[in-house]
Image (tube, rainbow, N blue to C red):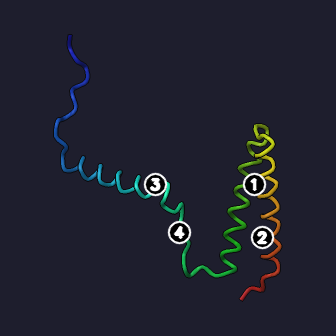
Amino acid sequence: MVKVTPDPPRFLSEDALLNRRAIDYYLKASAPDAPTFILNDNLSFEDALAHAADLLHCAVETAHSSAEAMNVQQRAVMHLVEMAKGVVDRALECVQPQ
């Protein structure tokens, strides 16, 4: 029988070792105990509100695109997200630009 695919090398090249190190590093960075994202310490109050509004807007649009498949709990969470977006939008209206 003739093998079409060769056996993988028994040793790893330097490039393969570097690739493995990079993969291990980034996979460990997304471990459950690692933060999902890190906030900038210099983020102003207004910028934080604006960013939260953008994130909530994305969450609302994502949920609306799959609205037909949502169960009762998901619809309740969607309602809470919409309410939070309304509150953040109102807070942004109240903030005086500096």
| Alpha carbons under labels 4 and 1: distance apart | 22 Å
Residue 61 at x, y percent in the picture: 74, 52
Lateral position of residue 44 relative to residue 63, left or right: left
| Alpha carbons under labels 2 and 4: distance apart | 20 Å
Q: Amino acid at mark 2?
A: Val
Rendered view: 17 above or below 41: above
Task: From the image, state whether disc 4 or disc 1 is nearer to you.
Answer: 4
Quadrant where the N terminus sits is top left
The residue positioned 81% from the left and 50% from the top of the image is 76
The extreme left residue here reads: 11
| Alpha carbons under labels 3 and 1: distance apart | 27 Å
Residue at numbered disc 1: 60
Please give the label number shown on residue 38.
Answer: 4
Residue 10 at x, y percent in the picture: 17, 36
Q: Amino acid at mark 1?
A: Val
Helix, strand or loop under label 2: helix
| Alpha carbons under labels 3 and 2: distance apart | 30 Å
Task: Classify mark 1: residues with Cα within 10 Å, few (<14), some (14-19) or many (20+).
Answer: some
Residue at numbered disc 3: 31
| Alpha carbons under labels 3 and 4: distance apart | 14 Å
**Label located before the other in sequence (4 or 1):** 4
Is the residue under label 1 in contact with that under label 2 (CB below 8 Å)? no
**Label located before the other in sequence (2 or 1):** 1
Lateral position of residue 88 relative to residue 30, left or right: right
Is the residue under label 1 in contact with that under label 3 (CB below 8 Å)? no
Q: Amino acid at mark 4?
A: Ile
Lateral position of residue 75 relative to residue 62, left or right: right
Residue at numbered disc 2: 88
The extreme front residue here reads: 33
